[in-house]
């Protein structure tokens, strides 16, 4: 099986080959599916990442969620091993989250996630208050793999949404 680092490099190279306009279309498709999921599951408290250049775009999605009256929180890295959640006014939030919308380098059809290798989400989601929160991975269809190596600390997703599937 391919190593995690090789998968990360391969996916990063795939990103570099993508057409920006096509990724924008895929972002809109993912956004529509996420909004449908939020409505269908009556979700109120949402943690969603602010995307890097090689992740599914979330700026418009965050705006749509706030416009719909949802409570939106974003993770912020504060050290080499820790992140916190903040609200729109930059207050630290430590209460229940209904859904975490999580990026990944790759995901599998069995809801496994491969991140960037720093374990931020794995450590954070292992906290007691988030054990029952739903974990929603979002990615482009080219980031879905048959399998990846996982370890005991790796947190699985409950659902994965791509531009072509839920």
Image: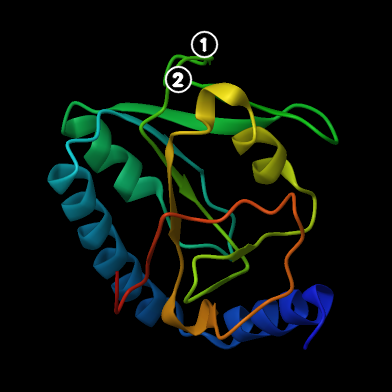
Q: Residue at x 44, y 14 (%)?
A: 89
Q: Is residue 66 above or below residue 163?
A: above
Q: In this view, does 145 lie above or below 73?
A: below
Per the image, label 2 sits on a secondary structure element best described as loop
Per the image, label 1 sits on a secondary structure element best described as loop
Q: In this view, does 91 lie to the left or right of 83?
A: left
Q: In this view, does 87 lie above or below 11?
A: above
Q: In which quarter of the image is the C terminus?
A: bottom left
List the single residue furthest toward the top: 91
Q: Is residue 11 above or below residue 66?
A: below
The foreground one among 47 and 109 is 109
Q: In this view, does 157 lie to the left or right of 112?
A: left
Report x, y in % for residue 163. Answer: 32, 74
Q: Residue at x 56, y 56 (%)?
A: 156
Reading the image, the residue beneath label 1 is 91
Q: In this view, does 148 lie to the left or right of 21?
A: right
Q: Are marks 1 and 2 in contact (CB under 8 Å)?
A: yes
The answer to which image quadrant residue 115 occupies is: bottom right
Reading the image, the residue beneath label 2 is 87
The foreground one among 112 and 70 is 112
Res. 157 mark: none
Report x, y in % for residue 1. Answer: 77, 88
Report x, y in % for residue 157. Answer: 49, 55
Report x, y in % for residue 118. Answer: 80, 50
The foreground one among 74 and 115 is 115
Q: Residue at x 59, y 55 (%)?
A: 52
List the single residue furthest toward the front: 152
Crowd rating for badge 2 (residues with CA inside 10 Å; few <14, some 14–19, many 20+):
some
Crowd rating for badge 1 (residues with CA inside 10 Å; few <14, some 14–19, many 20+):
few
The answer to which image quadrant residue 12 occupies is: bottom right
Q: Which residue is drawn at 31% across and 48% down?
A: 61
């Amino acid at each position: 099986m391919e190593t995690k680092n090789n998968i990360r490099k391969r996916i990063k190279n795939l990103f570099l080959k993508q057409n920006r306009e096509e990724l924008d279309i895929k972002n809109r498709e993912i956004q529509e599916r996420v909004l449908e999921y939020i409505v269908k599951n009556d979700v109120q408290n949402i943690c969603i990442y602010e995307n890097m250049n090689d992740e599914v775009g979330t700026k418009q999605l965050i705006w749509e969620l706030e416009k719909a009256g949802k409570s939106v929180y974003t993770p912020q890295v504060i050290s080499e091993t820790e992140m916190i959640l903040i609200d729109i006014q930059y207050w630290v939030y430590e209460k229940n989250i209904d859904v975490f919308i999580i990026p990944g380098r790759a995901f599998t059809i069995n809801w496994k996630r491969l991140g960037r290798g720093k374990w931020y989400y794995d450590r954070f989601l292992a906290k007691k208050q988030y054990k029952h929160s739903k974990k929603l991975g979002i990615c482009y269809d080219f980031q879905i793999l048959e399998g990846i190596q996982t370890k005991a600390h790796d947190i699985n997703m409950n659902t994965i949404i791509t531009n072509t599937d839920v």
